[in-house]
Image (cartoon, rainbow, N blue to C red):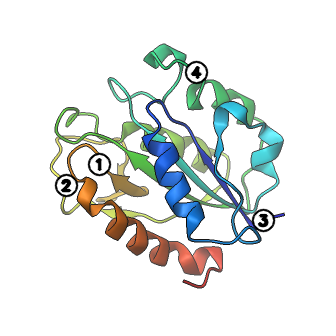
Amino acid sequence: MARIGLFFGTNTGKTRKVAKMIKKRFDDDTMADALNVNRATAEDVAQYQYLIIGTPTLGDGQLPGLSADCENESWEEFLPKLQGVDFTGKTVAIFGLGDQVGYAAEFLDAMGLLNDFLVERGAKMVGAWPTEGYEFEHSEAVVDGKFVGLALDLDNQSGLTEERLSTWLQLIAPDFDLSL
């Protein structure tokens, strides 16, 4: 079994694309294949000590899911299944996708919602990311002046994705016992 679980929710497939970009950098012993949470179980998540999770923010700062007009279930429906999972001792890094121009008042809010959920259950969150280089009005994903995870805007800054992803993976590498 791989050491690191890689889970994502998506609506348009962009978050899946980023999850696959992450997976490509690691062998199967290090990182599991990216798994959409609409196909995952709580046991799938609970088996890992190290987790990387991704989410887009939809609409008015929502997690992806049926109430956000997604075609399939996603984080909104999966989080209740994780209610009983104890994340104490687990190291978790989050990446989020958002549109800082079209949704400047709720940029990456879903990443903040996931972070809060995991922190409440004892997870050690790593991978905080600077807010410099982004233009937005408000984000629930900003804590102590930084995003709680990697902030990506494939709509307006797609050219920065590879560089940001590489830098972030180097940032979390010590916490995940990774050699890059």
Give x and y (percent) for residue 49. Answer: 75, 62
Q: Which residue is mark 2?
A: 134
Quadrant for the N terminus in the image: bottom right
Q: Amino acid at mark 3?
A: Ala
Q: Does the image show residue 125?
A: no
Q: SS at mark 2?
A: loop
Q: Amino acid at mark 4?
A: Asn
Q: Residue at x 37, y 38 (%)?
A: 109
- Of mark 4 and mark 2, the one earlier in the sequence is 4
Q: Which residue is mark 4?
A: 72
Measure the alpha-carbon separation of dots 4 and 1: 22 Å
What is the quadrant of residue 69 in the picture? Answer: top left
Q: Is residue 139 above or below residue 61?
A: below
Measure the alpha-carbon separation of dots 1 and 2: 9 Å
Query: Pointer 4 and pointer 3: residues touching (CB < 8 Å)?
Result: no
Q: Amino acid at mark 2?
A: Tyr
Q: Nearer the viewer, residue 173 or 126?
A: 173
Q: Residue at x 67, y 53 (%)?
A: 122
- Of mark 3 and mark 1, the one earlier in the sequence is 3
Query: Pointer 3 and pointer 1: residues touching (CB < 8 Å)?
Result: no
